[in-house]
Image (tube, helix red, strand yellow):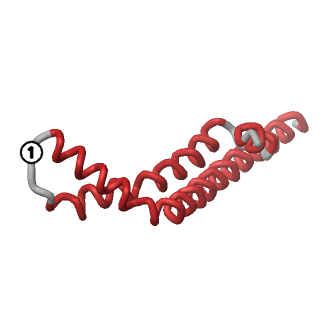
């Protein structure tokens, strides 16, 4: 299934699709970032190997949470995209009304 085509067929423009994608991506990486800076920050060491270890532990530790947070991010992105879509349709409708009113005069 092509997600881009599916979203386009439902009337989402580029900005709205980007909101949906961004929410999904942020939801997917949020647990690893959280674990890195909250949980793994106590791991001692200033070398790049220690930093790599901290990120590795965080990514592995985030796996159980990733599906839920990705879903939550996708839902958040979906609501944001729908809000933008609704505002766009309202503006288009207002513009059409204005044009109709101008044509009546």
Given residues 41 and 43, the one toward you in this image is 43
Q: Residue at x 32, y 59 (%)?
A: 34
In the displayed structure, 17 sits above or below 29; it is above
Q: Quadrant of the N terminus?
A: top right
Q: Residue at x 60, y 39 (%)?
A: 15
Given residues 62 and 75, the one toward you in this image is 62
Residue 60 position, x and y percent, is 37, 56
Left or right of 51 in this view: 71:
right
Residue 70 position, x and y percent, is 53, 57
Left or right of 52 in this view: 104:
right
Q: Quadrant of the C terminus?
A: top right
In the displayed structure, 6 sits above or below 72; it is above
Given residues 102 and 69, the one toward you in this image is 69
Disc 1 target residue? 46
Q: Residue at x 74, y 47 (%)?
A: 89
Left or right of 12 in this view: 49:
left
């Amino acid at each position: 299934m092509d997600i881009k085509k599916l979203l386009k067929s439902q009337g989402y423009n580029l900005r709205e699709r980007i909101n949906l994608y961004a929410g999904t991506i942020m939801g997917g990486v949020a647990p690893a970032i959280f674990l890195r800076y909250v949980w793994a920050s106590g791991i001692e060491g200033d070398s790049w190997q220690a930093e790599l270890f901290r990120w590795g532990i965080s990514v592995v530790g985030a796996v159980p949470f990733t599906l839920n947070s990705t879903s939550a991010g996708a839902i958040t992105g979906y609501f944001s995209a729908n809000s933008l879509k609704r505002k766009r349709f309202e503006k288009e409708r207002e513009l059409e009304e204005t044009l109709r009113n101008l044509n009546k005069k």
